[in-house]
């Protein structure tokens, strides 16, 4: 019975690790995409306000500038959060790998005892 629990733990751990990796990749792409949107749009809006660039939008210039500035700040904050996120994901992965190795070793030892 214990052998089945260990196998289930290992399979669920691999699935969880893969899901965690995909979540981290999606977060990184969203953070960098939001930051790059803000980096491109804020200067365009500021140049449009002083008349050097024509910005065509349904929004008024001030709300558009606030939205783009908010995207820039949110993207910058999310981009700064990438490093601690990756460190914590690596910590979770190493804990799982260590516990899976212990369970795998115990599983093989129990199989050797029964055979």
Image (cartoon, rainbow, N blue to C red):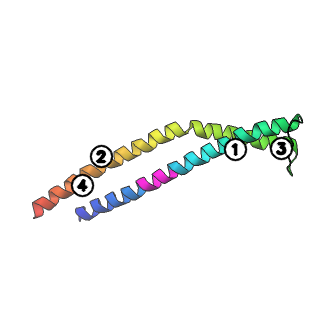
Residue at the spot of label 2: 98
Total numbered labels: 4
Q: Write the start and end of the magenta stretch as one range.
A: 17-23
The local secondary structure at tag 3 comes to: helix
Cα separation, mark 2 vs mark 3, equals 51 Å
Give the camera-side residue of 58 and 4: 58
Q: Which residue is mark 1?
A: 37
The residue tagged 4 is 104
- Residue at x 11% of width, y 63% of height: 114
Mark 3 or mark 1: name the one nearer the start of the chain.
Answer: 1
> Label 1: how many residues lie within 10 Å, few (<14), some (14-19) or many (20+)?
some
Of circles 1 and 4, which is in front?
A: 1
- The first of marks 2 and 1 along the sequence is 1
Q: Quadrant of the C terminus?
A: bottom left
The residue lying furthest to the right in this view is: 51
Is 114 placed above or below 69 here? below
């Amino acid at each position: 019975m214990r052998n089945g629990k260990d196998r289930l733990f290992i399979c669920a751990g691999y699935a969880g690790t893969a899901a965690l990796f995909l979540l981290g990749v999606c977060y990184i792409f969203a953070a960098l995409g939001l930051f790059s949107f803000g980096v491109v749009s804020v200067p365009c809006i500021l140049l449009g306000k002083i008349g050097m660039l024509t910005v065509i939008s349904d929004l008024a210039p001030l709300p558009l500038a606030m939205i783009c500035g908010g995207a820039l700040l949110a993207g910058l904050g999310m981009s700064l959060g990438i490093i601690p996120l990756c460190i914590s994901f690596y910590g979770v992965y190493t804990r799982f790998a260590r516990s899976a190795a212990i369970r795998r070793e115990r599983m093989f030892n129990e199989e050797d005892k029964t055979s």
